[in-house]
Amino acid sequence: MACFQIQSLAMWRLLTLVLVSAATLFAQKYTGPQPEKADLPYLLHADSLVATEAGVAKEENRKAEVVAVVSGATSSAGTPLSTPIFVIRTDQLAPEKLEIYKMEVKNGQREVILSRKKKQVAKPIRTNVIRLGDNLYKIEVDQSLQNGEYAISPSGAEQVFCFRVY
C-alpha cells in the first residue's frame, strides 16, 4: 500500500512538472515595442508604434438622428494595413470595452450615425483582445477594413481614439 502511495505521489509530481513546462512553452511572450502612455491605443507597425489621435466626440441631435462628431476631416494617425493591430497599456480603460467604428467625412469633420428614429445604426467592428502581460493588451481587428476614417471608443463614452486606413 505504501509503495502505491509513493508511485501515485511521484506520478502527480511528474504530471505537474509536465503541465507547468507545457504552459511555459505555449505562453505568449510579447517582446515588441512598448506604449509610451497608458490608456492610449497605438497602431502596431512592425517594430514601431504609432499613437492614435485622442479626442472627444460631440453628440449632435439632427432631426431624427443622433450623430457623434469629431472635428477635422482626417486623423493624424494612419496605417496602410487593412487589418490593423493595436497595442495598449491600460490604467483606467478596459480593453474589452473598446469598440471600433467606421466614420464618414462630411463638411470637414468625421461623424458616425449612432441612432436614427430610436434605432441603433452604427455597429462596432469585431475585434479580438489578447492579454500580453500586466496591463498590456493587443487588439486585433477581426475583418478587413476599407480605406477611410475610424474611431476607437470605450462603450458609451465620448472619448475617441481616431486613425485612418489608407
Image (cartoon, grey):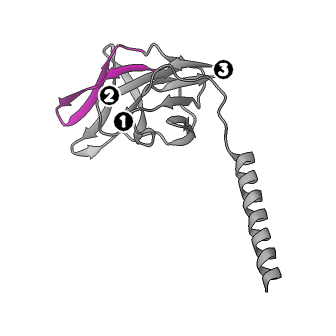
Where residue 87 sits: x, y (%)? 54, 29
Q: Is residue 2 left or right of residue 128?
A: right
Q: CA distance from mark 2 to mark 1?
A: 7 Å
Q: Residue at x 39, y 35 (%)?
A: 93
Residue at which label 1 appears: 154
For the N terminus, which image quadrant?
Answer: bottom right
- The answer to whether residue 142 shows anywhere in this view is no
Element assignment for label 3: loop
- Where is residue 97 shown, x and y percent of the image? 40, 41
Query: Is 111 on the left or on the right of 53, as rendered?
Result: left
Residues at marks 2 and 3 touching, judged by CB atoms closer than 8 Å: no
Of the two numbered discs 2 and 3 on the same chain, state the one appearing first in sequence. 3
Residue drawn at (56%, 41%) of the image: 130
View extreme (bottom): residue: 1
For mark 2, what is the residue?
159
Instruction: Determine the CA span between mark 2 and mark 3.
Output: 27 Å
In this view, 71 is above or below 18: above
Which stretch did the figure color magenta? 52-74
Q: Main secondary structure of the magenta part?
A: strand
Q: Is residue 85 left or right of residue 107?
A: right
Q: Circle 1 sits in a helix, a strand or a loop, which is it?
A: strand
Pick whichever, 47 or 102, lies toward us. Answer: 47
Instruction: For residue 46, say whether it is visible.
Output: yes
Residue located at (46% from left, 39% from top)? 125
Q: Which residue is rendered at x = 38% and y = 14% of the image?
A: 73
Q: Are marks 2 and 1 in contact (CB under 8 Å)?
A: yes
Q: Amino acid at mark 1?
A: Pro
Residue named by callout 3: 47
Report how far apart the C-alphas of labels 3 and 1 lie in the structure: 26 Å
Q: Position of residue 79 (x, y in %)?
A: 56, 20
